């Protein structure tokens, strides 16, 4: 039998982890459930009336105004992520230059660059799928969601990264300058968007 805690956890699992209203939604749901149970309704009937957790979560996200992230905020977040990679790659290459035989250095350089590129891709896909944001986006106050406001799937996270993997990222980025929600071409394709975690003044 599904408990109130189980149901609330299911609803929260369909909300972005970076969404500021998560705790408030959980409290409201718990209060609503407890109030109905206190008035004599069976828990199972209350949960059935609330409906599918995924649909309920989507109703919450659709009620929260989402502010598109600006082009410059997104660029700043990406620079932070790239800087983190370089902070690992550059010292690695310097140490390799000093301690590895010169004849092997080109191969070590190639392996390091390719490995860091693959690592960056895996990190980005995993972070955006699991947490809704990379470290750069977290610092910049941004997160990735579906167009409905719910968390993205693994497939959507992969599609978002294809322009980087196939080296036409800057062409893809140009779309963000002209689309209403500041979406890149492959964000339009994957039906995802990047929004601010902090609402503007006057918004809940």
Image (cartoon, rainbow, N blue to C red):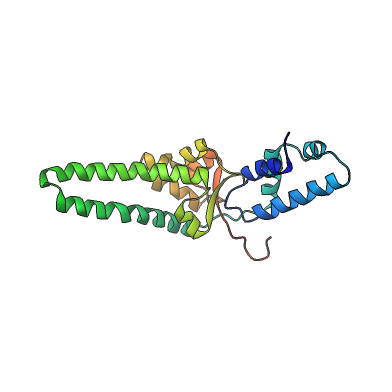
Q: Residue 137: x and y, percent?
A: 48, 55
User: x, y (%) of residue 164?
Assistant: 39, 43
User: Foreground: 24 or 116?
Assistant: 24
Name the quarter where the C terminus is drawn: bottom right
Identify the residue at the far bottom of this view: 201
Q: Percent from the top left, x then y, of residue 185?
A: 48, 43
In the displayed orientation, state which residue is furthest to the top.
Answer: 1
Front one among 160 and 129: 129
**Screen quadrant of the N terminus:** top right
Query: Residue 51 placed where, x, y %?
Result: 75, 37
Q: Is residue 161 left or right of residue 68?
A: left
Q: Say above or below: 94 vs 110.
A: below
- Judge from the rendering whether residue 123 lies leftward or rightward of residue 34; answer left or right: left
Give me the residue at 49% from left, 46% from top: 128
Q: Is residue 144 visible?
A: yes
Depth check: give the residue in front, 42 or 94.
42
């Amino acid at each position: 039998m599904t408990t109130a805690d189980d149901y609330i956890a299911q609803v929260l699992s369909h909300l972005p982890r970076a969404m500021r209203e998560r705790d408030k939604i959980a409290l409201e749901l718990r209060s609503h459930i407890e109030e109905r149970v206190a008035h004599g309704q069976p828990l199972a009937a209350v949960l059935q009336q609330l409906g599918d957790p995924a649909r309920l979560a989507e109703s919450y996200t659709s009620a929260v105004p989402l502010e598109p992230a600006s082009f410059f905020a997104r660029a700043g977040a990406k620079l932070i992520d790239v800087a983190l990679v370089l902070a690992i790659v550059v010292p690695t290459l310097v140490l390799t230059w000093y301690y590895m035989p010169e004849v092997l250095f080109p191969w070590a350089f190639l392996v390091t660059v390719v490995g860091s590129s693959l690592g960056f891709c895996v990190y980005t896909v995993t972070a955006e799928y699991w947490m809704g944001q990379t470290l750069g986006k977290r610092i910049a106050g941004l997160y990735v969601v579906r167009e409905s406001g719910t968390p993205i799937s693994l497939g959507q996270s992969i599609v978002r990264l294809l322009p980087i993997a196939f080296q036409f990222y800057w062409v893809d980025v140009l779309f963000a300058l002209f689309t209403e929600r500041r979406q890149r071409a492959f964000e339009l394709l994957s039906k995802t968007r990047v929004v601010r975690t902090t609402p503007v003044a006057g918004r809940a």
